Image (cartoon, rainbow, N blue to C red):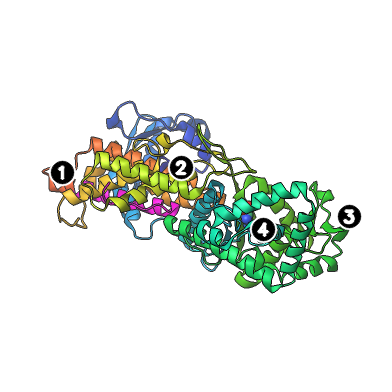
């Protein structure tokens, strides 16, 4: 309201800047003197008139324009006092936030965003780091979708590279079909570790591994069928996690998808004279940009991670015609993406500035095993199940008669992990502390979900009454209610900001803030009262709060149980 008043005053007093007006506004000593007062003393010099006359003129001029945000404008001495039409204000906000499409926009209409996220490495465990990219990427997808963008969700599986040569050697030497089928990725990791131990003693194993990878690149049938099997086995485990999280992708186009497209990258670089030989390998020098060179082709002619990322970019541009291509990975890949984006720029493509790396910090366990960059030991699936079972215990203890406990335990257990990953800026490290994550009174997923369930319970208890359309807004003008409504009204700006900065934490903060404001409202403003007009109006506030919380959690990928 203050902002609006400043705007109106600056229209009427073009000689003054917005800052001057903002600085001059005062809150009157007594409430019956209005909500804000504007002193005209300093204007005497400019207008060469007595302050009380200026105030009187200003008042009359503004009254004539009949602004609907004021219920009354008064002039006392050199002051103009403004009384806000709170009822009008409450009505406006309520109408706005009740709209089905509140928070949506069409800024993305006709535009496409590719989001490359999750992307675990085949034959390796899906660790808590991959959980983070999955959670952040999924949230960005929902946010961009809300703003009207068409989004392509891409899982760039790490399913190609020399490590598969090693794995084939290891499997042929020490593996067994039964064990791999029985234990899946864990078994593949076991023989992979053994490979490294043995290769320390016998370097010829490394040569064999390289040969197998070259065979893979040349399309050798045996090599490819073993590799495909490893991949299928891994995908079963990954998809189990995605299902648990309720998340999906449009494309599982991993690195292998680009194996016949890397030669074209080499041609493009050669055409522009960008490729240099260095110790037998082929690189793009980035010395002028203070970066290590970007390796394109190894001595034996095989491609590497960066080559496949370049190939993927050409493919995505040609296929999806993206306006933005976003990569969600750990901070340690910062240089890699800077190099890839630079190479695109050097090749002369003006869309290099549509490429965005969205990095995030490390995940660790408080007082427990730590996940380091090199050896992420915490399995995502274990963490998710542990969270669900801890919530199950809490429910058994606090609300044993709850209907459909298993579904609720899953929604809250998963929600708690997601919320914890999204509550701070991406770049901040995430620490797992079960007491904090699962605290129903903290700034947590369960707290927000609990607030939602509380709203749902209020609505249930109010019986079958349907809220009438003509609400008496005059009963919603108390400070607590107005603060709640104002808080909710921020939603469209929050969504837009979160998209611009690639920061879902803004949505998470919004959800907590609305929940806190609601709980104050719930405490201060009794809902189930005799007066029908008050009851109706307050129930309507409960219903818009529910919608706001649900919409916000939806953008984080979190579900809202009706009872907890
Ligand atoms: N597989 C990689 C990893 O686990 C992440 C891939 C990210 N995406 C990409 N296009 N490079 O670290």
Q: For residue 285: magenta?
A: no
Q: Is mark 1 within 8 Å of ligand 1?
A: no
Task: Check the image and report above or below for 522 versus 402.
Answer: above
CB under 8 Å between callouts 2 and 3?
no
Secondary element type, mark 4: helix
Dot 1 or dot 2, earlier in sequence? 2
Q: Which residue is mark 3?
A: 279
Secondary element type, mark 2: helix
Which one is in front in this view, the residue at disc 1 or the one at disc 2? 2
Pick the front one: 393 or 531: 393
Gap between marks 2 and 3, in whole Å? 46 Å
Residue range of the region highlighted in magenta in the rendering: 536-564
State ligand 1's quadrant.
Answer: bottom right
Dot 4 or dot 3, earlier in sequence? 4
Q: Which residue is mark 1?
A: 528
Horizontal placement of 24 versus 122: left or right?
left
Task: Give the residue at x 33% y 52%.
Answer: 560
Secondary element type, mark 3: loop
Dot 4 or dot 1, earlier in sequence? 4
CB under 8 Å between callouts 4 and 3?
no
Q: Which residue is mark 2?
A: 420
Q: Which residue is mark 4?
A: 167
């Amino acid at each position: 309201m203050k902002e609006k008043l400043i705007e109106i005053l600056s229209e009427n007093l073009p000689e003054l800047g917005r800052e001057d007006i903002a600085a001059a506004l005062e809150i009157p000593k007594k409430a019956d003197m209005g909500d804000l007062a504007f002193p005209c003393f300093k204007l005497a010099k400019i207008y060469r008139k007595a302050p009380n006359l200026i105030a009187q003129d200003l008042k009359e001029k503004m009254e004539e324009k009949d602004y609907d945000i004021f219920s009354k404008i008064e002039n006392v001495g050199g002051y103009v006092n403004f009384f806000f039409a709170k009822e009008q204000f409450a009505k406006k906000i309520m109408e706005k936030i009740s709209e089905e499409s509140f928070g949506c926009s069409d800024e993305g209409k006709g535009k496409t965003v590719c989001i490359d996220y999750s992307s675990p490495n085949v034959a390796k465990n899906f660790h808590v780091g991959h959980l983070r990219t999955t959670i952040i990427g999924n949230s960005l997808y929902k946010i961009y979708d809300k703003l009207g963008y068409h989004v392509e969700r891409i899982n760039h599986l790490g399913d190609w590279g020399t490590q598969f040569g090693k794995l084939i050697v290891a499997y042929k030497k020490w593996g067994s079909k039964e064990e791999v089928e029985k234990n899946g990725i864990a078994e593949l990791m076991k023989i992979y570790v053994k490979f490294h131990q043995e290769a320390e003693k016998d370097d010829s194993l490394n040569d064999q591994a390289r040969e197998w990878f070259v065979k893979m690149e040349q399309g050798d049938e045996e090599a490819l069928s073993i590799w495909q099997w490893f991949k299928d086995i891994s995908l079963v485990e990954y998809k189990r996690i995605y299902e648990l999280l309720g998340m999906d992708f449009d494309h599982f186009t991993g690195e292998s998808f680009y194996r016949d497209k890397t030669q074209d990258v080499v041609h493009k670089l050669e055409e522009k004279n960008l490729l240099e030989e260095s110790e037998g390998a082929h690189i793009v020098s980035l010395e002028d940009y203070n970066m290590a060179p970007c390796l394109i082709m190894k001595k034996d002619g095989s491609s590497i991670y960066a080559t496949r990322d370049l190939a993927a970019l050409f493919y995505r541009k040609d296929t999806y015609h993206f306006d933005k291509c976003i990569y969600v990975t750990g901070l340690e890949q910062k240089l890699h993406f800077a190099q890839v984006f630079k190479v695109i720029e050097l090749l002369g493509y003006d869309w290099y500035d549509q490429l965005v790396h969205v990095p995030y910090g490390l995940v660790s366990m408080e007082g427990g095993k730590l996940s380091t960059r090199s050896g992420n030991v915490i399995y995502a699936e274990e963490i998710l199940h542990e969270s669900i079972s801890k919530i199950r215990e809490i429910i058994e203890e606090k609300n044993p008669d709850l209907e459909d406990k298993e579904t609720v335990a899953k929604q809250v257990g998963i929600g708690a992990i997601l919320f914890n990953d999204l509550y701070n800026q991406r770049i901040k490290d995430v620490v797992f502390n079960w007491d904090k994550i699962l605290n129903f009174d903290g700034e947590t997923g369960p707290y927000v979900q609990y607030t939602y369930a509380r709203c749902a319970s209020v609505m249930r208890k109010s019986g079958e009454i349907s809220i009438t359309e003509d609400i008496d807004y005059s009963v919603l003008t108390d400070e607590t209610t107005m603060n709640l409504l104002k808080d909710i009204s921020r939603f469209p700006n929050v969504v837009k900001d979160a998209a611009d900065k690639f920061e879902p934490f803004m949505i998470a903060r919004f959800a907590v803030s609305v929940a806190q404001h609601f709980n104050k409202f719930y405490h201060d403003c009794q809902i189930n009262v005799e007066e029908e007009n008050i009851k109706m109006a307050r129930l309507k506030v409960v219903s818009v709060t529910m919608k706001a919380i649900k919409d916000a959690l939806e953008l984080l990928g979190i579900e809202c149980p009706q009872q907890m």
